[in-house]
Amino acid sequence: MSALTEVQQNAVRELMRVSPVAVELGERFAAAGHALHLVGGSVRDALLGRLGDDLDLTTDARPDQVLALVAGWAEQTWDTGIAFGTVGVLKRGFKLEVTTYRAEAYDSSSRNPVVTYGDTLDGDLSRRDFTVNAMALALPDWRAPSAFVDLYGGIDDLAARVIRTPGTAEASFGDDPLRMLRAARFASQLGFRVDPSVVAAMAAMADRLEIISVERVREELTRLLVGAAPRAGLELLVDTGLAAWVLPELPALRLEIDEHHQHKDVYEHTLQVLERAIRLETDGPDLVLRLAAVLHDIGKPATRRHQPGGGVSFHHHEVVGAKMARKRLRALTYGKDVVEPVCRLIDLHLRFHGYGSAGWTDSAVRRYVTDAGDQLDRLHALVRSDCTTRNRRRAAALAASYDDLEARIARLAEQEELSKIRPDLDGHAVMQLLGIPGGPLVRQALAHLLELRLEHGPLPHDDAVAALLAWAADNGLNPAAGPAE
């Protein structure tokens, strides 16, 4: 079966699934004298056999006319995108976004597109970002020979798995510089190669990204990272210079390697770690794990030191890297739910390397688990992924050592509920035994008890009480009389 025949069969299968709703809406528009087309990503994804329940449509009707046409038919509508000509519609589980033909462009200093309505489908398609997103399908008669509109060879490019622009790439990126990031994102999401003319324009126009809002940049980076092949997208960002405006720490990992100071290519190592981490994911794309993999060594350039005899060291690069990652992720406006776990993983990713050589006590294992907290599974994945050595004996030794650590964690967890480690006495008991109110002293006492719990494991109640009273005496507290004067 040819690639073209396969995509056509994909489209028929997908369109049969969505046609009850799409055709109904098309009939309403046609009856009112308006055109309606399935367009852009929806046509592309139908041809790829991956169309979801979110449908993109375009029409010559203005937004107020669209709202009138769906009144009484839609189960719900929303107008959050109406300033850009888009009306949202919910019908039988499908989310449809109906956008009036439009033209949009940026001026040299604007972060926001200037939107004007277009008059024709052809004009609308000519302003689309890439040829594979510039195809349309007329409704309601989507089976008619003339229903499929492909003015720029989108179906051929889709079959060839290539990203090109309808017109010149320079004109497309001039209209909306964010499209440069979208090209990298599609390289990741779809596994398509980017046409050399598009790559050249991205490299020449990279600095145009400065007019794009950081929130839109962050969204494209996120989509790239959770795609099927994020390495391809990241390499494109670095090779074109776009990474300097998005994630400048990544190209900085291309450390110069000279004949006297040999060390592994940190940039290549990082990409390998990312690919290895993806293979260890168990529940779909994990943004936090992937960001941690990409950023885990960004502290190395700042901490690199050449050693006598040709060695290279990166002492404390995990600490420096965690600080750098927090600054970058906050600048990209990621929330705490992303920033904090990523930085914790970076900060902890080297601790394991003292396990095999030094021999950890149960106390050290407890601390590893406690410090990782709810990120323990991700930390396991990151640490295992960080072993990219070509030395098979060393790789096997590291893997066996981490297997042993995980087994010890499992045994201790079974005995002690490691994930729920708490002081052996709670705050109420501390206040009652010491005769003090809540406050800093109670927190200090609990911290001391937690240290004992980590060091020695669970303490019998009487031993915990004795330890608390001993701490109180050492700190000038008289349990019978309350705090010392």
Image (spheres, rainbow, N blue to C red):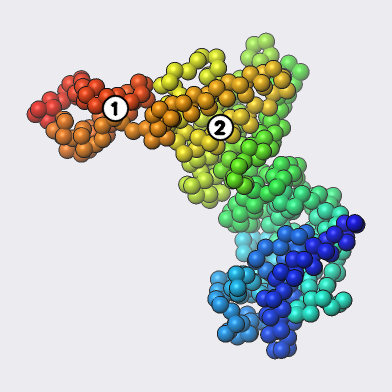
Q: Is residue 48 left or right of residue 266?
A: right
Q: Secondary structure at mark 1?
A: helix
- Circle on res. 380: 2
Q: In which quadrant of the rendered view does residue 137 lie?
A: bottom right
* Image quadrant containing the N terminus: bottom right
Residue pictured at 50% horizontal, 15% vertical: 359
Of residues 194 and 399, the one drawn nearer to the viewer in this rendering: 399
Of residues 446 and 315, the one drawn nearer to the viewer in this rendering: 446
Q: Residue furthest bottom?
A: 32
Residue pictured at 25% horizontal, 29% vertical: 445
Residue 471 in the image, given as x and y percentages of width and height: 22, 22
* Image quadrant containing the C terminus: top left
Residue 115 in the image, given as x and y percentages of width and height: 66, 72
Mark 1, residue position: 449
Q: CA distance from mark 1 to mark 2?
A: 28 Å
Q: Secondary structure at mark 2?
A: helix
Residue pictured at 64% horizontal, 11% vertical: 308
Residue 213 in the image, given as x and y percentages of width and height: 60, 57
Q: Residue furthest left?
A: 481
Q: In which quadrant of the rendered view does residue 109 lie?
A: bottom right
| Mark 2: amino acid | His
Do callouts 1 and 2 mark residues in contact (Cβ within 8 Å)? no
Q: What is the total number of numbered labels drawn onto the structure image? A: 2
Of the numbered discs 1 and 2, the one sitting upstream in the chain is 2
Circle 2 crowding by C-alpha within 10 Å: few under 14, some 14–19, many from 20:
many
